[in-house]
Amino acid sequence: MGRRLKAVDGSYAPTLPPPESREVDLTYVFPERIVSAIRELVTRLADFAPSILSREAMVYAPAVQWVMPRLKLDRHFAVPRAQRAWCIGDATGTTAGVLPAAVSGIVAARDALTQMKGGEIQDRIWGEL
């Protein structure tokens, strides 16, 4: 993690300069509750270190950003030109979150059962739901 060192002229220089870090508005990368918690923490820390509220103060925060590339799949999440292969969940690039990922698994499982057993097992298992 980086920190700022005070220069002789009174300014601060980041010890984690670009490209390792980038200045960004945290409200764009974190939910409001996280940004509010960071603001509250900094405000409370200012009681002990008032300079933390200066315009030169910097908060380093990880910004994990990943989006899987969207795969070409059929409506059952089956991989084209591959036998008995399905791609489900966030790895498909079509879902984001637990519920959509779970639903993609159910859709793929139903399709897999239909293909592997001719549909009779699927009707027995999913017909009861």
Image (cartoon, helix red, strand yellow):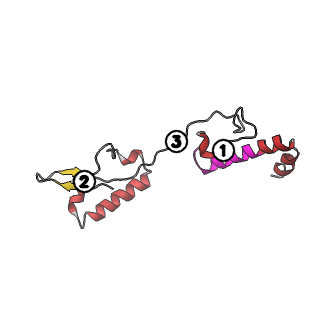
Marks 1/3 in contact by CB < 8 Å: the verdict is no
Where is mark 3, residue-wise? 67
Mark 1 is surrounded, within 10 Å at the Cα level, by few (under 14), some (14 to 19) or many (20 or more) other residues, namely: many
Q: Is residue 4 above or below residue 84?
A: below
Question: Residue at (31%, 54%) from the top-left corner?
Answer: 59
Where is mark 2, residue-wise? 57
Say what amino acid the circle numbered 1 marks: Ile
Q: CA distance from mark 1 to mark 2?
A: 43 Å
As helix, strand or loop, the secondary structure at mark 1 comes to loop
Q: Is residue 80 above or below residue 125?
A: above
Q: Earlier in the sequence, mark 1 or mark 2?
A: 2
Regarding residue 70, the answer to whether it shows in the image is yes
Residue 58 spot, x, y in % from top left: 28, 52
- Disc number for residue 88: 1
Question: Residue at (24%, 57%) from the top-left corner?
Answer: 53
Residue 123 spot, x, y in % from top left: 86, 46
Say what amino acid the circle numbered 3 marks: Val
For the magenta stretch, what is the residue range?
96-109
Q: Main secondary structure of the magenta part?
A: helix
